[in-house]
C-alpha cells in the first residue's frame, strides 16, 4: 500500500511539473472575434496575432463566430476546424481556446479573477463597465466556455499600433503578466481593416486537412483538366447598399488591397464595388483566353451570372458548390490558376493574401493598378 501511495504521489508530482512547464510566464491573450463574418474576423485575427507577439503573450486562438439562421444565437466553431495550429507556432506561441479553458484556465485564470478589458465603457452598461456579454455574438461566445466576468478594466488610451514600439512597451508596463496573467478583450485587439504591417501573417494560416481535402476533391470531380479560373462575386443586396457609401468612404472594408493604403494605386468606383454583369462576362472572357482555361469556379453570395458567362464562352465549364461552404470556396479560389475578386470585400482579401504568398496571380473587378506617376 505504501508503495502504491508513493507511486500515486510521484505521478501527481510529475503531472504538476508538466503542467507548470506548460504555463506561459509571460501571460495570455483572449478575445471575442465579435465583428462581422469570416472575412472581417480573419482581418482581425492577423492583427491580434501580431499584437500578441508584440507584447510577447501567448495568443489563445478563439473559435470562429458563425451565424446559422434561423438559429437565434451565434455558433462558435473551433479554430482548428478550419486551420492548422502548428504552422502558426513558427511565428508565435498559440493554443486553442478549448485547450486553454480545459487545461490551464482553472489555475491560471480562476473564475473568481476573470476581468475583461475594453477601451471604454460599452453602450448599455449600467455599471460603467465593459458589458462584455451583452448582445449576440458577445454573450453566446463567452457562454460557450462558461465564462463570466467579475470586473472590467479600461485600457484606453492605449492603442494597437504595432509599429509604435513605445506603445507596445506601455502595454507591458501597465499590464505585467505577474499581475495580469490573462488579458481578455471584449473584441479583437487589432485594427480593422488589417493594417499593412500585419498582412504578411497570412502565410502562417494553413487550411486544415479536412478543408484542403474537400477543396481538392471538388476540383477533381467538377473541373476539367488543365487551367481553371476562380472568381468571387459579391452581388447580394446588403453589399449593394454598402457600395452606396463608397463616395464618402472610398477606403472602406478591404479597398486598400487594390488602391493601396494611401490611395497610391488608384481610386475606388461603384463598378469595382458592385460590377455589372457585362463587366463580369468581359473580364472573365479575357482571362479565360489569356490562361487557355477550360473551367471557371464561381463563389458567390447571391447571383452567379453563370448563364450569361456560359453563353459568351460555350467551350468553358462553369461550376459552383451546390451547398454553401464558404471555407471550401476560399480554399478552391486559392488553388485556381488565376483569381478575380472584389476589391472591397474582406472575403476576397483573404484569397488575395493567400495567393500572394503562394506566388499566384490575382486581379479585381473593373480595376487596373496605376503607378504613382499616372495619378
Image: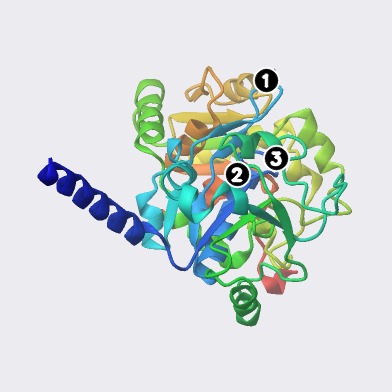
Q: Secondary structure at mark 2?
A: helix
Which-is-in-front pick, marks 3 and 2?
3
Question: Is the image coloured rainbow, by chain, by secondary structure, or in one colour?
Answer: rainbow
**Quadrant housing residue 117:** bottom right
Which-is-in-front pick, marks 2 and 1?
1
Q: Which residue is mark 1?
A: 71
Residue sitting nearer the eye, 148 or 32: 148
Q: Which residue is mark 3?
A: 138
Q: Which badge, 3 or 1, is on the more N-terminal residue?
A: 1
In x, y percent, where is residue 272? Answer: 73, 45
- Most extreme residue toward the bottom, as rendered? 166
Instruction: Decide: few, some or many residues near mark 1? Use Cα within 10 Å; few <14, some 14-19, many ≥20.
Output: few
Which image quadrant: the N terminus? Answer: top left
**219 lies above or below 353:** above
Residue sitting nearer the eye, 77 or 6: 6
Say if mark 3 contacts mark 1, CB within 8 Å: no
Q: Which badge, 3 or 2, is on the more N-terminal residue?
A: 3
- Most extreme residue toward the front, as rendered? 2
Q: Secondary structure at mark 3?
A: helix
> Residue 348 got which mark?
2
Residue at image point 55% right, 58% down: 29
Mark 3–mark 2 Cα distance, whole angstroms, equals 26 Å
Instruction: Decide: few, some or many residues near mark 2? Use Cα within 10 Å; few <14, some 14-19, many ≥20.
Output: many
Q: Secondary structure at mark 1?
A: loop
**228 lies above or below 43:** above
In x, y percent, where is residue 350? Answer: 56, 47
Amino acid at each position: 500500500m505504501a508503495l502504491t501511495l508513493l507511486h500515486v504521489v510521484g505521478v501527481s508530482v510529475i503531472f504538476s511539473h508538466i503542467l507548470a512547464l506548460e504555463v506561459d510566464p509571460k501571460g495570455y491573450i483572449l478575445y471575442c472575434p465579435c465583428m462581422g463574418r469570416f472575412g472581417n474576423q480573419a482581418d482581425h485575427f492577423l492583427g491580434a496575432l501580431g499584437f500578441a507577439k508584440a507584447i510577447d503573450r501567448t495568443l489563445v486562438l478563439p473559435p470562429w463566430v458563425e451565424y446559422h439562421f434561423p438559429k437565434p444565437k451565434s455558433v462558435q466553431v473551433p479554430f482548428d476546424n478550419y486551420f492548422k495550429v502548428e504552422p502558426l507556432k513558427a511565428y508565435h506561441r498559440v493554443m486553442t481556446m478549448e485547450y486553454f479553458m480545459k487545461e490551464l484556465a482553472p489555475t491560471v485564470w480562476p473564475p473568481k479573477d476573470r476581468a475583461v478589458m475594453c477601451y471604454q465603457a460599452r453602450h448599455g452598461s449600467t455599471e460603467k463597465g465593459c458589458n462584455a456579454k451583452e448582445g449576440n455574438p458577445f454573450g453566446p461566445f463567452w457562454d460557450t466556455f462558461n465564462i463570466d466576468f467579475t470586473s472590467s478594466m479600461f485600457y484606453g488610451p492605449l492603442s494597437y499600433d504595432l509599429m509604435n514600439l513605445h506603445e507596445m512597451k506601455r502595454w507591458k508596463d501597465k499590464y505585467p503578466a505577474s499581475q495580469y496573467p490573462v488579458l481578455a478583450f471584449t473584441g479583437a485587439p487589432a485594427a480593422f481593416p488589417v493594417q499593412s504591417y500585419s498582412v504578411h501573417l497570412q502565410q502562417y494560416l494553413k487550411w486544415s486537412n479536412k478543408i484542403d481535402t474537400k477543396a481538392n476533391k471538388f476540383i477533381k470531380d467538377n473541373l476539367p483538366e488543365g487551367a481553371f479560373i476562380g472568381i468571387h462575386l459579391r452581388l447580394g443586396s446588403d453589399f449593394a447598399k454598402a457600395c452606396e457609401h463608397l463616395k464618402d468612404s472610398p477606403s472602406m472594408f478591404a479597398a486598400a488591397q487594390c488602391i493601396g493604403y494611401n490611395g497610391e494605386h488608384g481610386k475606388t468606383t461603384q463598378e469595382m464595388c458592385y460590377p455589372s454583369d457585362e463587366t463580369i462576362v468581359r473580364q472573365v472572357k479575357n482571362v479565360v483566353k489569356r490562361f487557355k482555361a477550360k473551367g471557371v469556379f464561381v463563389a458567390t453570395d447571391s447571383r452567379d451570372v453563370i448563364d450569361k458567362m456560359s453563353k459568351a464562352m460555350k467551350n468553358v465549364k462553369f461550376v459552383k458548390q451546390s451547398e454553401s461552404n464558404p471555407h471550401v470556396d476560399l480554399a478552391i479560389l486559392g488553388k485556381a490558376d488565376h483569381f478575380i475578386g472584389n476589391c472591397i470585400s474582406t472575403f476576397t482579401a483573404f484569397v488575395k493574401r493567400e495567393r500572394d504568398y503562394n506566388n499566384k496571380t490575382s486581379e479585381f473587378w473593373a480595376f487596373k493598378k496605376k503607378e504613382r506617376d499616372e495619378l
